[in-house]
Image (cartoon, rainbow, N blue to C red):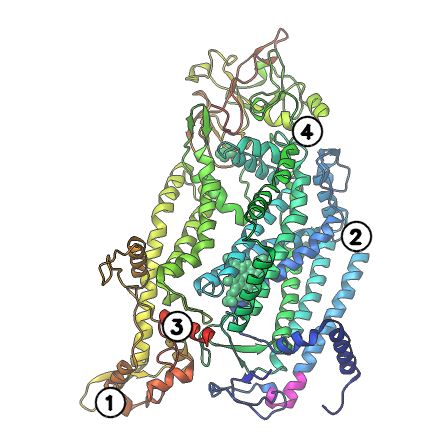
Amino acid sequence: MSTSSPVETAGAATATYVDKRLGSNRFLGRNLGKVFPDHWSFMLGEIVLYSFIVVLLTGTYLTLFYKPSMVEVLYDGSYVPLKGVMMSEAYESTLNISFDVRGGLLIRQMHHWAALIFVAAMVVHAFRVFFTGAYRKPREFNWLIGVALLTMALAAGFTGYSLPDDLLSGTGLQIIRGILQSIPVVGTWAAFLVFGGEFPGTDIISRLYAAHILLVPGLILALITVHLMMVWTQKHTQFPGPGRTNDNVVGYPLLPVYMAKAGGFFFIVFGVIALISGLVTINPIWIFGPYTPDQVSAGTQPDWYIGWLDGALRLMPNWETVVAGFTISWNIFIPSVVIPGILFTGLALYPFLEAWATGDKREHNLLDRPRNAPVRTGIGVMAITFYGILWIGGGNDLIATAFDLSINSLSWFLRITLIVAPPIAFIVTKRICLGLQRRDRDKLLHGYESGRVLRLPHGEFIEVHEPINYKELAVITSKTDYSPLPAPEKTDADGVKNKKYLIQKIQHKISHFYYADDVKKPTAAEIEAAQHHAAHDAMLEAPLHEYEDADQISTFHGGVLHHPGMPETNAEQVAQQENRSTT
Amino acid sequence: MTDITPSGHSSDHGNQPERLGYSPVADIPHKPRVTDIDPKAAKRAERQVASMFLLSIIFVILFVVAFVGIDKSTAIYIPVLGVVGALQVALGFTMGVAILLIGAGAIQWAKKLMPDVEVVQQRHDMNSEPEAAAEAAANYQRGKEESGFVRYPIIRRTLIAALALFPIPLIVLLRDLWITPPGESPEEELSRTAWHEGLRIVADGNFQPIRPEDIPVGGLVSALPIDIMEIQEEEHNLNARGKAAIILVRMDPDQIRSQQGDNWDYQGILAYSKICTHVGCPIALYEQRTHHLLCPCHQSTFDLADSGDVIFGPAARRMPQLPIGVDEEGFLVARSDFTEPVGPSFWERS
Ligand code: HEM
Ligand code: FES
């Protein structure tokens, strides 16, 4: 650098000043050039982060005007229809924010829209992570943090939804009270402690407020920090493609491209939320009216992410048992405590279950294409189907009215579908994945069908197969072939009893379930043979130059066919790692 | 930054940084962009980006103008949106566009003018180097020995016990989240409502006492105890209302198939709790032809002509009935409190 502008000089001076005190250049030197892979689906996590920042900013603004109090006051603000109505101060202050504070409604709606986008983006982000297998070693901890974040996000949404103390949100709280009371043994006391006595009491709003503005966001912030630090140290995964392997990261450096794109994207998300909030009304609490426990409006709907729990409550048969003078409300406890408990536990444990069942101990930095993990993809689609039916159940009254069906038969239909549809979804998804695997294999062997038909000299018609391009080749060859774990022996060679026989047997069964149908990638020899077959095609038309040397294909394009020195099995990789750490 | 190498072809134009050392995967074709080749296009992109930032500034000014200039009660009609608050829409629009343009400018800048060549970095296994692992183990060992954690089993065990117990005060302190009135339990509070013998029933809304003839056959009236407002003033909460709310329905006495007690109706007028026995939503959806009461929350359906029994939906318990009669002035009154708890089930009830 020959000349430097005043900005650069000042920048360098500042960097030095800070570095002398914090040693920051050590970090910057290592990290300003850090490479981030690019893919549209990696922006989902960013949307979550940015909408959370918008939630924090707008929420702070709202705290300046909102009063978390259930004291009854007479409304005298500028919204005419409610003038002279008794209401809680919480509701009154929310009306004031909406009608008397300039821009208050905008901020309220931005807060709500950003919260909805936050949860929605989080769910889709989790799907992306699930279906690509990004949660596999070494990223299992980050998956766990993600599940905790999802739980916290639901808590944040629900506590916030309740704060305006309008008729809708109060009804939601009433349902929560009923759910708490259904917990065996401690439920009644839990409800009384949470509400400070009977429902609705006068404490719940200020308690929810403490949770909503301090406890939950504090936890979310802490968890997000750890989440992102882990993404940073572990480096982001990448989709397979030319030049991309399990051992490298291909993408743009943090400075300047990634920073400009990610930073710019923050403003896009922020701006879009502001635009939507300016134009589209959400949660018009003035229409619902203040909360009172003896009023309800028909067709009430919770925010979208609570809908599935409401659906579960609706679809559950009305079982209740009285044992020794004590009541267990299965009809409430199962759908609102047991089922969500099982789902979230399953979600949290899935990476560990899968790794155990398949014996997969490798590090995975290259993402799976969903088709290459048919059972995982099937399980995901199954869960989505289950969720979707519960969600539809949450709107069964609206659907029944809209299509003029009887609620009764619709509920029965949904109850049966809830049990039957998920397994069907699993089977269908798995079949589709295997079909796609087979097509990939054919493409590797024969190229793709170009659609051009040739007439050979002796009159036969053939369709010309063109070689697939280098990008697709790299993507397809990235598939890792897995085999089921071997069946365990009851006794070893020396006749000693295998103590772990039973557990290994289960493991063997599950890994069989995962991988037995896997369509293997062609070997180099198979590709070669296929090329000979295609030779007369090739002589007539396109030379299959891409396939000249199968060995070279894989090394060159970062595939995992026969990459010299690359572990092909778990055992090999583990052995290599151990070698590396002992030598 | 030694391990950074471009993965695409390098090109000689000025935008692409010079980096040494190609990785073996560098031979991926890379097409230069128009802005890489044509200085005029690059200049155009530069102007585009700058105008986006400039427009953003203008929209911020417009935001302030709208904030000051538009009255908050002005409503305007906008196609699709309908009648909306002018200030709300103006503020949202100007703020949204101002922020959006910063983002759009930055991304345009990155896409058109910053290098678009992907680079490669190597990953390293996540586990630590053997020396670091050995050092950690050595330090742990030293700590274990110096502290005597193993040597002093009594200290160790008492410490573990103390740590296990120390959260107890924090949990005990939560007990007074509900300051329990003397002699009360949740069970008792949930089992009692404001109703008692001779208490007049008033219509919700106008709080007027009700005569039997005020309710036509097929009609439904939401009602409360006459003293509900006094109780609310005294207790400063809506708890009593949440339990005492009832509905009155009148049907042809011949159509009443059963009741929860003998003659708990008055001339075909039946009083039921308004609070759903499922999880507590108030109910007022009544189909007079079938005498069915439908809960709007989860569609539990109760047959009011048949003791309020559940005929469909997730609720497990019938709707509690309140025995009613008239006082000497001919107004409807309760003949007692409910004889079973109203609202959602709970563990202690049988
Ligand atoms: C407050 C909520 C969350 C925020 C702010 C957040 C943010 C992010 C960001 C910015 C990334 C990197 C970019 C990307 O891959 O999209 C990321 C990666 C990741 N997230 Fe999240 N996330 C959240 C919730 C979740 C949830 C609910 C899960 C799963 C249950 C999850 C699991 C992961 C995993 C495993 C990675 C590493 C992915 C990889 O390297 O490919 N996160 N997160
Ligand atoms: S509250 Fe009435 S059905 Fe659930």
What secondary structure is found at the residue carrying circle 3?
helix
The answer to whether the residues at label 3 and label 1 have Cβ atoms under 8 Å apart is no
Reading the image, the residue beneath label 1 is A536
Q: Nearer the viewer, mark 4 or mark 2?
A: 4
Say whether mark 3 is within 8 Å of ligand 1: no
Q: Position of residue A566 (x, y in %)?
A: 39, 78
* Callout 1: chain: A
Residue that carries the numbered disc 2 in the rendered image: B71
Q: Residues within 10 Å of mark 2 (few under 14, many from 20)?
A: few
Asked if badges 4 and 2 are on one and the same chain, I answer yes
Left of A385 or right of it: where is A484?
A: left
Q: Residue at x 36, y 70 (%)?
A: A571
Residue A435, position as x, y percentages in the image: 31, 67
In the depicted view, which residue is nearer to us: B312 or A1?
Answer: A1
Amino acid type at image mark 4: Asn
State yes or no: residue B42 in magenta: yes
Judged from the image, the secondary structure of the residue bearing numbered disc 1 is helix
Q: Is the distance from the Cβ of mark 4 to the nearest ligand 2 atom less than 8 Å?
A: no
Question: Could you say which disc has been placed on residue A575 in the image?
Answer: 3
| Secondary structure of residue under mark 2 | loop
Write the start and end of the magenta stretch as one range.
B36-44
Give the residue pinned by disc 4: B237
Q: State the separation of the CA atoms marked 1 and 2.
A: 80 Å
**Mark 3 or 1, nearer chain start:** 1
**How far separated are the C-alphas under marks 4 and 3?**
69 Å
